[in-house]
Image (spheres, rainbow, N blue to C red):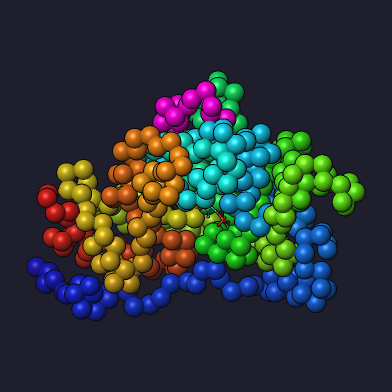
Amino acid sequence: MTIRTALAIDGGTPLRTRGWPAWPPPADEAQRALLHSVVDSGNWGATDGHLCDDLATAFAGRHGCRHGVTVANATLALFASLIAAGVGPGDEVVIPGYTFVASATSVLLLGATPVIADVDPRHLHLTGETAAMALTPRTRAIMAVHLAGSPAPMDDLRALARENGLVVVEDAAQAHGAGYRGRPVGSLGDVAAFSFQSTKAMTAGEGGLITTNDPALAGRAWSACNVGRVRGGYWYDHATIGWNLRMTQLQAALLIPWLDRLDDEIERREQFVRQLASALAGSDLPVRILDDPDGTDRNSRHLLLLRLGTDSEPVDKEWVVRALTAEGVPVDRGFPNLGRLPAVARRSTVLPTPGVDLANAAVVWLRQNVLMAAPDAVADIVAALERVLTDPRAIARGH
Ligand SMILES: *Cc1c(COP(=O)(O)O)cnc(C)c1O
């Protein structure tokens, strides 16, 4: 017989008192050396040297693309990608209801309209079916979001785009290094945007990058980010309307060396997730790691999405999140339903989104720094889940 110890949320001792790896991690030697060389040179801006171009080329190459453009952040990288792909004011762009708000606001920035579609509750991605329901004669693009490191089901989304003459923009802000059917994300649509903001899997505090295999599109993206200049042209010739959306060499100096460790870090998180999956499979806890769409070669494990509870016994997610966090296992509530954020919904077309609502009710995240802890943390996570989910308060009232 086990005697229940008091939960930390009730004043008991937290199950885990040790902390978690910091994110972002401190700079390594290679980053420090390159950053110092930039700082000491005084050539801090993108227009003062070749580091931003070096990063763009290397990062694009790592993601199966011949062309890359560095950008100030991924919101603007999505904005510039949409422009370069020919999306304009009044057009409609299909986006999933479960994503970061920038997937919608990048569309709004352009004067285009986000059409918020449902996701498949098994993996929380747009599907060919949910996206098809969102199409109108004004649809111009589908934004495929590679959520949490899991590639979107691109076969179906691309087929739908092909049939309807649409472009596919990948929001790869959460999926550096992920792969689908033998190809890296970033090379699966017409154009893709990555983020280097602090929470992402490669970061310089802020930053973004556009990848594509279409040279003309790359040129338009570059111009949009470089005040309408034509690459290689006269400095004050502004052939199109563009803006200064550039990153700095200081950021590139932190990011170039990261490419050498990205694969190791993904592998480390993957090992952790494998151990957690097998520990969960050996328990009878109502916790399920979300599936990946068919065709996924590699989930880059940016975040780990866990579905808690069951259809017949849904969890009280707010309480569970607070109780787990009190036990020293920090979990995130995750994204709200974009279609239920008034500021976004007012300017979007919102379709029914039962899949997103289910995610809001039942899905939590473990962040990448948790997945990068020493493997003995797996036992702490499972023990905390056990402690919290077996408490009667974990089950939603009304059940
Ligand atoms: C972080 C994020 C963005 C925006 O990236 P920023 O660099 O912060 O502008 C866009 N889409 C998704 C899915 C993200 O997670």
Residue 389: quadrant of the picture: bottom left
* Residue 229 painted magenta: no
Residue depicted at x 38% and y 77%: 18
Q: In the shown orientation, is residue 187 left or right of residue 40? A: left
Horizontal and vertical percent for residue 219? 77, 41
Residue depicted at x 77% and y 56%: 54
In the image, 290 versus 241, the foreground residue is: 241
Residue 292: quadrant of the picture: top left
Outermost residue, top side: 163
Residue depicted at x 66% and y 35%: 85
Q: In this view of the protein, can residue 176 be seen by the observer?
A: no
Residue 214: quadrant of the picture: top right
When the figure is inspected, residue 376 is found, relative to residue 130, above or below; the finding is below
* Residue 137 painted magenta: yes
Q: In this view of the protein, can residue 228 be seen by the observer?
A: yes
Residue depicted at x 9% and y 68%: 1
Q: How many marks?
A: 0
Horizontal and vertical percent for residue 185? 59, 43
Horizontal and vertical percent for residue 365? 38, 57
Q: In the shown orientation, is residue 101 left or right of residue 280? A: right
Horizontal and vertical percent for residue 149? 50, 49
Q: Where are the magenta residues, as a range?
A: 125-140
Q: In the shown orientation, is residue 289 left or right of residue 238? A: left
Outermost residue, left side: 1
Q: In the shown orientation, is residue 105 left or right of residue 381? A: right
When the figure is inspected, residue 110 is found, relative to residue 202, above or below; the finding is above
When the figure is inspected, residue 22 is found, relative to residue 256, above or below; the finding is below
In the image, 222 versus 183, the foreground residue is: 222
